[in-house]
Image (spheres, rainbow, N blue to C red):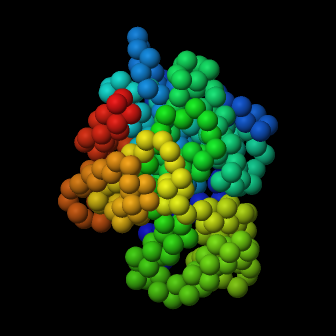
Amino acid sequence: MIRTVIMLICAAALPVGAEPPAAGVPIEASGPKGPLAGTLLRTPGTQGPVALIIPGSGPTDRDGNNPFGLRAASYRLLAEGLFHQGVNTVRIDKRGMFGSAAAVDDPNAVIIADYVADADAWVQAIRATTGAPCVWLIGHSEGGLVALAAAQEVKNLCGLVLVSAAGRPLGDVLKSQLRANPANAPLIGAADAAIDRLASGQKVDVSALPPPLLPLFNPVVQDFLISEFALDPAKLAAGVRLPILIVQGDSDLQVAVEDAEKLKAANPLAVLKILPNVNHVLKDVASGNPADNLAAYANADLPLAKGLAATIATFVRN
């Protein structure tokens, strides 16, 4: 009944073995207990801008895939697209997962501030490896929130690229996602109460929840959800004094064009690009058929949305 809630099913991280990178060379940053791992895709013979791709929610790996059927390879395709546009990238595995499994004992024992600390470590490592004076942050989905939070305190940033990023607190986004499926109607009251409680900084007693909601509010991730729901992306955007590019597909089933517009309204100097027929995993879905849209989540052979890499590259090169 809650199968349409994709972005915020970040309950159990379930780390699995890392897959070999499609291209590029390994790069590491310092983690709490062991290294954080990523892939550097660097254009030969030129310095060029360097961007750190921050992944979205749950056990999403550096290529943009996860063990629960997400096989779109969006981040690998984005890195390759930017490579051909003269932009260097580092795409990463989150602490405790995949190639970064040794960084912490428990990938679920994390809050947004931890991902901000990791972004800082990556910026330092990237600058040391490439000689770049500053690093761009490309945050996709939940990664956009991490990028906005990082911009409040991480030094040596060039600017932000927010791709399919929420413009409202993610608790509000989750409420909208649940309501998008009429079959979830019997769950709305309990879900809203749980979200509101977490947003107030309090944990939820899952024994009182309907079983279909248990994956969303698993006790092991409630500290993370509390840290996430407490942040308002628009307020964070308003405080950023760096260049910001906001990129939003108008066929995104998870984040609305309204979210991108809220981010733009909060920071009028930001540049907003709405891409037609582009969905949440950055693929073209011109048919408008929801089934085709969802099928793109499992199709690594479907190319990156036309114009996406060029839009980002043009912004970060100027």
Q: Is residue 160 visible?
A: yes
State the residue lying farthest toward the left.
Answer: 287
The total of numbered circles placed on residues is 0
Q: Is residue 285 visible?
A: no
Q: Position of residue 30 (x, y in %)?
A: 71, 31
State the residue lying farthest toward the top.
Answer: 45
Q: Position of residue 293 (x, y in %)?
A: 31, 59
Residue 167 in which image quadrant: bottom left
Of the 4 image quadrants, the one containing the C terminus is top left
Q: Residue at x 50, y 76 (%)?
A: 175
Q: Residue at x 69, y 55 (%)?
A: 111
Q: Residue at x 75, y 50 (%)?
A: 106
Q: In this view, does 15 lie above or below 288?
A: above
The answer to whether residue 278 is left or right of residue 286 is right
Q: Position of residue 316 (x, y in %)?
A: 39, 33
The front one of 314 and 109 is: 314
Q: Which residue is drawn at 30% across and 50% down?
A: 273
The answer to whether residue 7 is left or right of residue 309 is right
Q: Where is residue 47 in the image (x, y as percent from the top left)?
A: 44, 17
